[in-house]
Amino acid sequence: MKQFFSVKDISSISQAVKSALDYKQNPYKDENLGKHKTIGLIFLNPSLRTRMSTQKAALNLGMDILVMNMTSDGWALETKDGVAMTGNTAEHIREAAAVMGEYCEVLGLRSFPKLKEAEEDYSEEFFSKFAAYCGKPIISLESATLHPLQSFTDLITIIESFDYQYNDLNKQYFPFTKKPKVVLTWAPHTKALPQAVPNSFAEWMCQAQAEGLVDFVIAHPEGYALKTEFTIGANITTNQEEALKNADFVYVKNWSSYEDYGKITCTDNSWMITSDKLKGTNNAKVMHCLPVRRDVVIASEVLDSKQSIVIQQAGNRVWAAQAVLKQILTKE
Ligand SMILES: NCCC[C@H](NC(=O)CCC(=O)O)C(=O)O
Ligand SMILES: NC(=O)OP(=O)(O)O
């Protein structure tokens, strides 16, 4: 693997999950795989989980790690070509990325969207240019439109929390008794947030559904449809109560509108996930990528209940990152 940007970069989601869960059982089984190899983690935005779990994964593989927080510690980067740099940007992405490529065998990059122009964010200009100019394998640590390490983790968490078996012959997981119903539901928030997490979760769940692993439903208010390329095959509704009926997993996330790009067009707080709302579910497990605003997105009573698996989910970030790094280091 040379790039981990989307589910399309994984040849088998089942085998990737198996590899991650093997690391969870035995974190140090490849402790020398990354010896004398350096990963550079480049952040243009804040991070707790992605930063720490990817460092932990790299440490488990014996790698060296450099972390760079560009906005506080680096030079402001220019991305446009053919302009005289007379403004606030001190360094061009061409030089900056190429230099980081000199220091590292693998790079990870976090670059959130600006949420001003859909076309600009969805072109993924920053990620693509960085990938091209650094000349090294690159892992998305959440780009403008996708968060693949998160969604890979989410699939791992669903598979380990439900009745799945792994068939060694065809190297595929399969649901032993029935497929779980997985519901992605929009929830309220005070800020306009990216669509990266829901786009990515939808992309991975649509792939899982196509492989017979889950039934996938998305619930959101009018005006919050995700870009259709990420939701092919999903059952989409604006009726949250209907969607939650018999759900086995409820994945909660706010996102800003794609249609009215980057705007908050719904402030209906009744979309918050409460214990009452979970009554119609199949004692569903509740998931969120974190950070989560308590009693805005999800009620505290839910986050503090046994139904919440958000901490287990965040813990699994290590094994997702380790499985991805393995594929990069072994050039699988
Ligand atoms: N990396 C996980 C999610 C990051 C981001 N959340 C946030 O920015 C929350 C900010 C706040 O609550 O102020 C998002 O939704 O895409
Ligand atoms: N879920 C997630 O990516 O968390 P951080 O933004 O803290 O890395």
Image (spheres, helix red, strand yellow):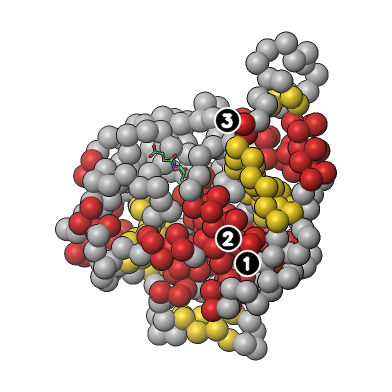
Query: Which residue occupies the foreground of this view, 98 or 148?
Result: 98
Q: How far apart are marks 2 and 3 (CA)?
A: 23 Å
In the rendered view of the protein, which quadrant contains the C terminus? bottom right
Tell which circle, 2 or 3, labels the residue nearer the N-terminal end.
2
The answer to whether 232 appears left or right of 93 in the picture is left
Local SS, label 3: helix
Q: Do the residues labelled 2 and 1 touch (CB within 8 Å)?
A: yes
Q: Distance between the residues labelled 3 and 1?
A: 28 Å
Say what amino acid the circle numbered 3 marks.
Answer: Ser
Local SS, label 1: helix
- Residue at image position (65%, 25%) is 76
Give the label on residue 278, or none. Answer: none
Q: Can residue 183 be seen in this view?
A: no
- Residue marked by disc 2: 56
Asked which quadrant contains residue 95, the reply is top right
The answer to whether 98 appears left or right of 19 in the picture is right
Local SS, label 2: helix
Give how far across and how far down residue 53 sits, in percent: 54, 57
Near mark 1 (Cα within 10 A), the count class, few <14, some 14-19 or many ≥20, is: many
Give how far across and how far down residue 71 sits, in percent: 59, 30
- Residue at image position (40%, 85%) is 177
Give the label on residue 60, or none. Answer: 1
The answer to whether 213 appears left or right of 111 in the picture is left
Give how far across and how far down residue 172 sits, in percent: 59, 79
Q: Do the residues labelled 2 and 3 touch (CB within 8 Å)?
A: no
- Residue at image position (55%, 84%) is 166
Say what amino acid the circle numbered 2 marks.
Answer: Lys
Asked which quadrant contains residue 178, the reply is bottom left
Near mark 2 (Cα within 10 A), the count class, few <14, some 14-19 or many ≥20, is: some
- Residue marked by disc 3: 72
Say what amino acid the circle numbered 1 marks.
Answer: Asn
